[in-house]
Amino acid sequence: MIKTDKEYQEAKKRLLSEKKSLEGQHAKLKAAGLNTDQIHLALDPLASFSLQLEEEIQEYENLMRGYFEDIINLKGIGRQLIALRIAKGLKQNELAARLGVKEPQVSRDETNEYFGASVEKIEKVLNALGVTATTKINPRLGNTG
């Protein structure tokens, strides 16, 4: 997951470089006499990496636009906190200032996607972001045993 604008810019540059490299490799393999299936077999791992990078870039761009996925049973709350910061246009150091902590703390929390964070810590981050989270409980229907 891309978490900062710097990572986003680097990912865009890396993707452009990867695409150029793929095009060059494709041309070399074609010139060497490989058929389409052989070329795809040789280049699929590189293409897969580029596709993953494209997806991460698209995810970051969607977050900047405020598009979020639902979370269920709080699974993914850490990613959601990061997404909210990105959507709010805040840098990690700005969130750190709002929380009264140093930037490396926010960076560590985000690297670990807030794994193991207390409810209190999550609430502080939500408050610092100016966000209210609402939980809706949907009891499962059917047998409870």
Image: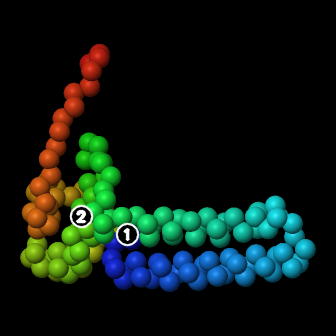
> Residue 27, percent across and down?
78, 79
Evaluate whether residue 114 shows in this view.
Answer: no
Per the image, label 2 sits on a secondary structure element best described as: helix
In which quadrant of the rendered view does residue 115 lie? bottom left
Quickly name the residue at label 1.
61
Dot placed on the residue nearer the N-terminal end, 2 or 1: 1
In which quadrant of the rendered view does residue 50 lie? bottom right
Q: What residue type is disc 2 on?
A: Leu
Figure check: 27 above or below 55: below
Do the numbered discs 2 and 1 sit on residues whose CB atoms are within 8 Å? no
Residue furthest front in the image: 65
At 74% from the left and 79% from the top, the residue drawn is 25
Quickly name the residue at label 2.
84
Per the image, label 1 sits on a secondary structure element best described as: helix
> Residue 80, percent across and down?
27, 58
Question: Does residue 71 appear left or right of residue 54 in this picture?
Answer: left
Q: What residue type is disc 1 on?
A: Glu
Question: Does residue 130 appear left or right of residue 80 in this picture?
Answer: left
